[in-house]
Image (cartoon, helix red, strand yellow):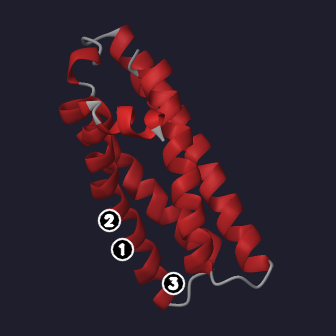
Amino acid sequence: MVAVLQRLTDWRFVRYLLASVGALAVDVGTFLALLSMGMWAAGASAFGYSLGIVAHWLMSSRAVFTGNVAERGAARTRQKALFVISALIGLALTTAIVWAGDTSGIDPRIAKLVAIFVSFFATWLLRSRVVFR
């Protein structure tokens, strides 16, 4: 519990959480829209997450990790590549969890909720310790 309270006082984590909420709105809004149009749940989840990746990069690089964004050139390209790799890991986790839930007969929206939490913490760890280090 103490670790959770310490995280809440880490302003970078709070900004990351807010950026994640913005990206999540893009992700889940797209997911629900595509799901309502009859798209396969795992595909809708992957497409929504992909749009959320773009939104998250824009917010993370401009509002969360501002002091840790690499300058132009090779360093910036490397950082973007690491960000995309972290996003692809989150995408793989999300798609796999939604697919597994849907295949098991679980409502895809419930599976998406589980995937959101797993992906959030996995990408936070990667981005805070590797990408924007």
Image coordinates of residue 56 in percent, x first then y, are 33, 45
Looking at numbered disc 3 in the image, what kind of residue is underneath it? Answer: Leu
Q: Which residue is mark 3?
A: 35
Circles 2, 1 touching at the beta carbon (< 8 Å): yes
Q: Mark 3: few, some, or many residues within 10 Å (few <14, many ≥20)?
A: some
Image coordinates of residue 66 in percent, x first then y, are 21, 23
Question: How far, Cα to Cα, is label 2 from label 3?
Answer: 15 Å
Looking at numbered disc 2 in the image, what kind of residue is underneath it? Answer: Ala
86 to the left or right of 24:
right
Give the quadrant of residue 29: bottom left
Task: From this view, report whether residue 25 is shown above or below residue 16.
Answer: below
Q: Mark 1: few, some, or many residues within 10 Å (few <14, many ≥20)?
A: some
Q: Which residue is mark 1?
A: 29
Label drawn at residue 10: none
Circles 1, 3 touching at the beta carbon (< 8 Å): no
| Disc nearer the start of the sequence (1/3) | 1
Question: How far, Cα to Cα, is label 1 from label 3?
Answer: 10 Å
Task: From this view, report whether residue 84 is shown above or below residue 65.
Answer: below
Identified at 61% across, 79% down, the residue is: 108
**Which of 54 and 133 lies nearest the eye of the viewer?**
133
Image coordinates of residue 130 in percent, x first then y, are 50, 19
**Which of 73 and 68 lies nearest the eye of the viewer?**
68
Q: Secondary structure at mark 2?
A: helix
Q: Quadrant of the C terminus?
A: top left
Q: Secondary structure at mark 1?
A: helix
Identified at 44% across, 17% down, the residue is: 78
